[in-house]
Image (tube, rainbow, N blue to C red):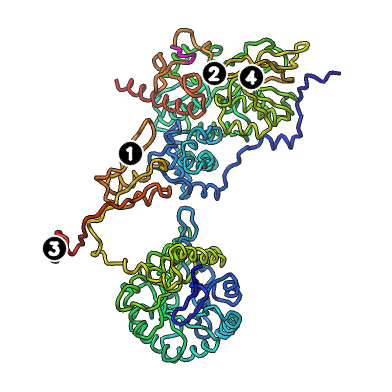
Amino acid sequence: MADLRSLFAGIRSPNPFWLASAPPTDKEYNVRRALEAGWGGVVWKTLGEDPPVVNVSSRYGAFNYNGNRLVGLNNIELITDRPLAVNLAEIKSVKRDHPDRAIVVSLMVPCVEESWKRILPLVEETGADGIELNFGCPHGMSERNMGSAVGQVPEYVEMVTRWVKQNTRMPTIVKLTPNITDIMQPAGAALRGGADAVSLINTIQSVVAVDLDAMAPMPVVGGLGTHGGYCGPAVKPIALRMVGEIARNPDTRGLPISGIGGISTWRDAAEFLVMGAGTLQVCTAAMHYGFRIVEDMITGLSNWMDQKGFAAIDDVTGRAIPNFVNWNQLNLKFKTLAKIDQDACIKCGLCHIACEDTSHQAIARLRRDGTRRYEVIDEECVGCNLCAHVCPVGDCITMVPQPVDEVLTWPHHPNNPAQAAK
Amino acid sequence: MDPRPDIAANRLSPHCLAINFADAHPPLTGGQASIEADRCYFCYDAPCVEACPTGIDIPGFIRGIATGNLAGAAHTILESNILGGSCARVCPTEILCEGACVRTAQEEKPVVIGALQRHATDWQMDSGTQPFSRAAETGRHIAIVGAGPAGLACAHRLAMHGHAVTILDARPRAGGLNEYGIAAYKLPDDFAQHEIDFIAAIGGITIQTDRILGRDVTLADLEAAYDAVFLAIGQAGVRMLGIEGENLDGVMNAVDFIAGLRASATGADVPIGRRVVVIGGGNTAIDAAVQARRLGAEEVTLVYRRGAETMSATGVEKAWAQTNGVTIRTWAAPLRLDGVDGTLRSVTFTRGRLHDGRPVHDQGNFTLEADMVLKAVGQLFLADPLDRGTIAIENGRIAVDDQGRTTRSLVYAGGDCTPGADLTVVAVRDGRNAAEAIHADLTAATGA
């Protein structure tokens, strides 16, 4: 059995699966259920200063695709709308009863040092294991110069992080917004400010759908809509890229990363780990299916690690980073070709029409004895993978790498006007 | 007193009959249709389309259902098959579109295309609107003989092209086999008539019932009075068993039994035997056997002369019969029908086997006691209504080219009276294609 115990920026948890700061971690009741279900830790929903914010009714919008619900989730909920004292008391109670779990508290107060100085000791007093600075929330709170309004200005990220580190002993995770051009700017700023770790991504600014009767963005609140924050499986690719950038960049290498963004299964978790994450934060999948999903995440990750011979989480973290390179380091001599398993083919024709209409006319549509047959024309196939992606039958179309006799990258390619010496 | 023959109406309570003859396969809900539509892979050059005699763009209409574009879905279906509603209910989809569905190859669970087609066409018919409009009146007038699926499909397409159409039908109600020849639970709630109303609502179509070709009017009369004639007269004859006892009381044709049941409002007044033997192996035999059970027959045995693999009833139909408590016996040829005082008592069969690839019945006899025998050994085209010698007959049916032209100028034919599979959907295709041929021929004649 692989050892799933996690030590992340000084915070211990029995497994790397944490619930992200979000509605599932807004109250003691929910958090206790989560911890009983097996979650390694939680990031408590963001606390702010009293008086608490007020949330609207009608808070979530969904992106459903081809019969799958909640491919993406959009929310316009703000931070906790409960009094600070209530949350603090509940955090203390939960931590007391679950000393082995990671209880991290998300915080968002105005960009004034006094505000941070006021709230930090109160959180420290709960016995929480760490804090997460919410510099990511892209809706509502950002209009009040908090959340992503801070996260989008590297100088503010660095400044506030420094204030926090000067005023608390607690490990400090800085949560980054993806609503920026270069994730390295806020990540570097967090590091300079003294952050113990970063977590990312927070939600992406979004209009998830438009109600065509109300003529308003969804979710519709009394006839009006506003942009929200987008999360769920659809954002995973964006998150993986940003996590990987921070993990591979020499300036931030070694900075612990808590991966967030559409993690729904152990496989997603493994991908985030190998791209540099040390812990994993989950929200949408739990909101979709309940806390029990963690069971398969734990056993699935553990079984996969056993198969791969990884003994501990640290053995997994960053495994794919050496292979995550800039485009111009890719070998232009590499070639892969589509291969269709004729016995598995169900004759849907999707590979043919995708290639014929939108790619390289490399799949012939034939008739053999009256039955349909689709064949790859090797000479035309550029190995783009599209056919394999559209094929509805698992492993029917495989991409077969061809023998490679040399490595030729763009910097050395004769077509490159700025060709380097070979 | 000898209770035999035990043939009676009212075997079951009205409540029970209502259940037994209600829609056997209720419609999909919107949610079910949405889930099912999402199972369609939207195949290119889809096998299901090729398997549909009317060539409906099935992936196209299912995409309409998936996206909530039901009007578009219905239009896609009905532009190829104006009887898409009844075909959705009566087509043996398991040997047509659903049999060819790639999901069948992948997981033996096709997309339920028939049910989805019903979902879209029901929406159209419930909307009270017409998906198509007529072209400007051409002044041409075409006579159609037979208001079954072929005749109706032809009429609608001709009307779309702006022609006027008069349909003559021998029966009191239009609809042909949809009205008289299909099991009641497949087309309940007077669906055939609703569909006719929907088709005729395009305008330009007049239907005259109780008008019989060869009795009330001749083909020559029609040719003289109209610009073209489409014959969709089906198969009016029934094959005989050709054995002793066929005229006994209690022996009847399955098609007559089915028609009688369809003409009855509730089925309560339709007499049925306590023990019924159905002879035949096609879908008519199945429809008769199952409906006999559903009327309250205690024992229904369907007997077929050869093996199950050569029965023309589909696997789904056979399973349906068995689910309904029908016993299917194969390899048994009827030898004689025995009766007392002119009334049926039993049927005797000879067991058969395959010998050198041919059926041989030499395995001894067995006898089934029966109050009623329903004969379903096939229907026959009767050429009698046509003036003999005026139109070429081929293999017992009216010879036509691939667009329904007979050997007589401006006389066309389609459906069961012409060669080809005896399926509603094939009849629809024939009618539609003949209408296009009529339109082309009349237009060409005008231009010349």
Which residue is found at the position 62% from the left and 27% from the top?
B286
Which amino acid type is shown beneath numbered disc 3?
A: Pro
Q: Is residue A189 above or below residue B92?
A: below
Real-space CA distance between mark 1 and mark 4, rounded to the nearest whole angstrom:
47 Å
Instruction: Determine crowd level at label 4: few under 14, some 14-19, many 20+ residues with C-alpha closer than 10 A.
Output: many
Frontmost of labels 2 and 1 is 1
Q: Would you name the residue on which mark 4 appears?
A: B332
Q: Is residue B235 left or right of residue B40?
A: right
Which residue is found at the position 77% from the left and 12% from the top?
B340
Q: Would you name the residue on which mark 2 appears?
A: B235
Q: Secondary structure at mark 1?
A: strand
Q: Would residue B74 be counted in the magenta stretch?
A: no
B58 or B211, nearer to the observer? B58
**Mark 1 belongs to which subunit?**
A
A239 or A218, nearer to the observer? A239
The answer to whether marks 2 and 4 mark residues whose Cβ atoms lie closer than 8 Å is no
Real-space CA distance between mark 3 and mark 2, rounded to the nearest whole angstrom:
80 Å
Which residue is found at the position 51% from the left and 81% from the top?
A47
Real-space CA distance between mark 4 and mark 3, rounded to the nearest whole angstrom:
86 Å
Q: Is residue A206 left or right of residue B348?
A: left
Q: Which residues are magenta?
A: B392-397
Say which quadrant the N terminus of chain B sits in: top right
**Mark 4 belongs to which subunit?**
B
Q: Position of residue A103 (x, y in %)?
A: 52, 80
Q: Would you name the residue on which mark 3 appears?
A: A417
